[in-house]
Each structure stands twice: as C-alpha cells, then as structure tokens.
Image (tube, rainbow, N blue to C red):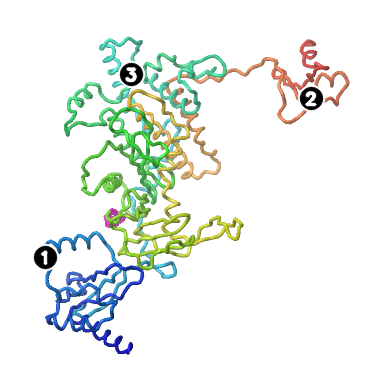
Amino acid sequence: MSRKRSSSADEALKVLQQDAGSLICPNDSSSDDEDLIHLENAEDGDSDYCPPSSDSDEDYESLISKLPRSQKHRRSPPGLLQPLSPGLQTSNRKRSLSTQRTSAPAIKCGKGGSVDSVEEDRWYDREEEDIKPSPLKFMPTRTPGPTFDITTAWSPLSLFQLFFSPSVIRKIIDNTNANAAKRKEAGMKFKWEVLTVKDFYIFLAIITFTGLVSVHHRADYWRKKWPYNFCFPSDHMTRDRFEAILWSLHLSDPKEDEENDSKRKTLEYDRLFKLKPFYTELVTACKVHFQPYQNLSIDERMVASKSRISMRQYMKNKPTKWGFKLFVLADAATGYTWNFFIYTGRNKSPTGRGLSFSAVMDLLHFPLLGSGYMLYTDNFYTSPALFTELSKKNFGCCGTIRKNHIDFPRTQNNDLPKKPERGDLRWIRSGKLLFVKWMDTREVAMCSTVHQAYSGQTVRRRVKLDGEWQIIAIPVPDTVKDYNRSMGGVDLSDALIGSYSVGHKTMKWYKTLFYHFMDIAVVNSYLLHKELHKLRNDQTQTKPFTHKAFREQLAKEMLEFVGATVTPPPPSTTCVPLFFEGLRKYCKRCFKDGKPRVKTNIYCRGCQVPLCLTQKKNCFRQWHDGK
C-alpha cells in the first residue's frame, strides 16, 4: 500500500512540475520553515520563464490530494492560486528580500517549461572540493618599493625631509611667527624672538629626543640635579624658548583661520583647516615616495586625546578608547602608512552606501596604485557589495564578516553543528564571493573573492586531550591563513609609532595631531631606510639602523644640519672605587708588596687598577697616598 502511495505521489509531483514549470522542494529535516520556490526568468540567457499552467483548480486539488502529508503544506506554485492583494504581495516581497538565501533549491527552467538543473543552496564541508579562482594579475603603476633614486646616499635626515620638506617647514615657521605676533597684539605677555629655521630644527630635535627619553614633566629635561642632569637640550635651547615656540606653534595662516571660523554652521566650514596645508602635503608625500607591495590592509587608528571637541570618538574595542579616529591604508609587508584621513564625524556618505564602503574607496587611490592588489579588511568594512565593486576593478579582497550582515548566507542546510570540533569548517560560494565558517576557539566567518575554500593547509594549536596538553595540527581555510599573515599592516605601523611616540599633553587639539604626524613621518622614514638597505643588497654595507638608533641619528643630524655641534660629555677621571661585574682580579698593591695571589672585586675608576678595600685591609687608600 505504501509503495502505491509513493508512486502516485511521484506521478503527482511530475505533473505539477510540467504544469507549473517549477519544482516542489523535498522536505528539509533541518528546518521547519516554509521553503520558497525560486524561478529564474528568461533574462539569464540559458533559461526561459516557465508560464503558469492553464489547468483548473479542481485538477490541481486532485493532484495535491495524492501528495504525501509532508508535501501538502508546501507553498503552491505561482499561477495556480488566486492573486494576492497588493498589501500581501508587498509584505511577501519584503520578507523574501530580508531572507536573502533560503534552504530551497534554485530552479533552472529550459525552453518549454522543462527543468534543466537544481542548484542546492547549502553549506559544504572541507571534503567537498571548491573551484580555485584564477590568480590576480599584479599590475602596479610603479615598481613596488621606494620611488626615488636608490643609488644615492640617503641619511635619516634626508629621508625625514621627504615628509617635512623645506616648503612645509617654511610655512610652519611663517604661520608660527604670525600667530605669536597676534598673541602679542592681544596683550599676552611672554618673551618672543622671531622663529628661524635653526631654532625650528632644534625644536624638532628636542621633540624627537623626548620620544627616546621619557620623564614625568617636560621641565625635567632642563633640570641639573640628579637624576635629571641631561646635557641636552639645555645646551642648545632654554626651556622658556622651547615653551614659547610650542605655545605659539601654528600650522595654518591665522588670518585664514578667522575667515574659516566665520563660516561655522555652514557647509563651507572646514573642521580640519587648522591642520592644513601640512596635513594634505604629508598625505601626498606618503603616497608619492613609496609604492606598496601587493598586500594591503585597512583599519582604524586612535590618537589619544582628552580635548573637548566633537571630532573626538569613542571605540570600546581599541586600547586607546577616546581620541581622534583615523582611517589608515598600510602596506601589509612593511607597515608603511600609505594613505590616511581623519574622521570628522557623521556625515552623508558620497557613495550612498555607508561609512565603511566610502572609507575604503577614498583610501584606495586607483590611478596611483594600479590593479591586482589584495586588500584585507576586518568585519567593519567587509561587505559583499564592496568586494564585488573592487573585484570589477581587479582588486582582490579578503576579510572577516559579521554573520548578521544582510548579504551573509542565511541557509541552515548542512551548517556547523551546535558544538563543532576545532577545525570544522563550512563554505558556500556565490559567484566570485566565497563565504567560510571555521571553528577555532570560537567561530570565525570569512569572505573572499580570490581564495579557494580549503586546500589542505593546517595550523598548530595547543589542546587538552585525555587530561594532557598536546600540540596538534588542525585544518584551516586558506582565507584565515592569509588573513592572519597580511592583516597586521596597520597594527605594525601602530606598534612602531607607539614604541617611541613624541606625543605630549597639550591644550590645543591640532598640536596633538601635529605630534602624530611627526610620528608618521619618522616611522615612514625608518621603513624607507630599511627598504633601501634591502634593495641595495650590499654584503659589505653595515647593517641598517634599528628603530631606536635611527631616531638617535635623526636627532643628531637635525642639530648638525643647523650648525649646532653635539659635544659628548667628557669622561670622568675621578678616583672612585667601583665593583667588577661577576669577576675578581689580582690586587695591584698586594702584587707590588710581594703577594701576587690576592684577588679583589674592587677597582679604581680613575686609575683602572684592581685594589683591595676591606675592613682590615685598605689597599685603595695606600695606593693613592703612595702617589
């Protein structure tokens, strides 16, 4: 009896398929929701829309009565029921758009209403092989690396002057002098002398020095008492002169500032005017003097600030939670800051697709970059719309994605179990877009346009098996492997900036960003120095400077550039007893007295001879008294 029912049900299904030009989906045991039937119209080129059947409703009901109970509650094929009211049609359309992907298969109908193929929308595991996308053809507009003449000698100062050019320094000096004169006219009493190029370079050298030597108060750099008895900077500039320059420091023209301030609460008002033109020229210099390698990364950067200004942002997931937010494009291999802009607050997106989309498109200067680049982003920027748009420009993309994103697959068919094992993965492909779920310590969702789902790569993890910690190899998707390798470009740049940052507390918000701009210039100069050493590939050449040594040499060359000599303190020749570190030597005084085997761990700093100095024997005093 059951066989007859199943055969009659099959016949009914075939008749419905031929009449309605659609396929009733088999029941999905993993979900109790109703499945939608997808039809592809004739615009696809390889299929035609299946017209509804002209059979009467009575014939349709007789066919439905022959179906099993599990199939009777399926949605009826289009064209066989009475049309819905306009309100219901609108609500159903919205619901179908909100559920971008369902567990129902997509139907391809050939000419005449025949079913050609069924494409199941489900997650695949790592045993099911994915297609391997063709690799990108890397075609940069310039040779990756430094774009200037690498055959000439480049000192740390000459590299720094690529970003702090003579024209930029001249504008800052003129604007600072104008701002100081404006303050004097306003009745402020302070000693001021006209700022010169020599004074400004000494000022920059002191700022660089403060990043190397940290004290609690800036005035401690000029103290002469121990332990603050520094020779520099007091030998080259007084504290009052330094404070006067820092107090009057101004990057823009004060007269133009007044004109811009008069435009407040209008569309013509520029909130970053006090940083210009230095801000724009620094960004241009970063892009001109270096061509990134193939892998790029985009992320946010926070510049700590407590200023009361609306541009200050809060990011709870950053180590620096309050401050100015910068969107940064960095080279993944070197950490070079290639492009950045300051976020000034909520504004209407020029692209109409949100901040994350427009930020990426603004940072990627396509005419200067070229094509074939690989971009890595986090889940704030990753979206199928952005990846599809960049794929049209021959840019590959890979990044983490939020599972509640509107375009993320919603199907639960063959999804990860509720308690997946470490290394389990699922993937699904939609054209060039690849979506991957992978289980590590927690579930990770990825999206990519250039990767294969799984190619057999593994990663080592420390897990506890049978009460013992062991290191095992677990499968890892290609997207995760490359993401971990190349996403840290901005983080590397942040680490280099934070290690010897020159930032100090200030009452003006634009001075905080001036400190950060100087950090960017120094770090980019250091990275160019390393790239030059790598490209020359000269075995006889000395090793490149470390980051600390580069900053020390830069401060020294700044002083020498303006004729300020750096005189090291004379070595001390005072006779003082000191201890050897971890060794003992024969006493010189005892040796002269005929006792050659007496050892001591004390020596004279001025005479540089080992001498006994104990409660019973004082060769140190006898040696110096004998002189």
Q: Main secondary structure of the magenta part?
A: helix
Residue at 78%, 10% in the rendered image: 625
Q: Are marks 2 and 3 in contact (CB under 8 Å)?
A: no
Q: Are marks 3 and 1 in contact (CB under 8 Å)?
A: no
Residue at 28%, 64% in the rendered image: 101
Q: In the rendered view, does 437 fall on the left or right side of 408? A: right
Residue at the spot of label 2: 600
Is residue 12 highlighted in magenta? no
| Residue 466 found in image quarter | bottom right
Amino acid type for the residue under numbered disc 2: Thr
Amino acid type for the residue under numbered disc 3: Ser
The quarter in which the N terminus is drawn is bottom left
Closer mark to the observer between disc 1 and disc 2:
1
The quarter in which the C terminus is drawn is top right
User: If you read the primary sequence from the N terminus, does the residue marked by circle 1 or circle 2 appear first?
Assistant: 1
Q: Measure the alpha-carbon separation of dots 3 and 1.
A: 72 Å
Residue at 49%, 18% in the rendered image: 220
Q: How far from the left and from the top, in percent, is residue 527?
A: 44, 39
| Secondary structure found at label 2 | strand
Q: Measure the alpha-carbon separation of dots 1 and 2.
A: 105 Å
Q: How far from the left and from the top, in percent, is residue 142?
A: 34, 48
Q: Of all residues shown, which one is farthest toward the right? A: 594
Question: Magenta region: which residues?
Answer: 386-396
| Secondary structure found at label 1 | loop
Q: How far from the left and from the top, in percent, is residue 332?
A: 41, 47
Q: Dot 3, how many residues are within 10 Å of its Cα: few (below 14), some (14-19), or many (20+)? A: some
Residue at the spot of label 1: 85
Residue at the spot of label 3: 248
Q: Measure the alpha-carbon separation of dots 2 and 3.
A: 59 Å
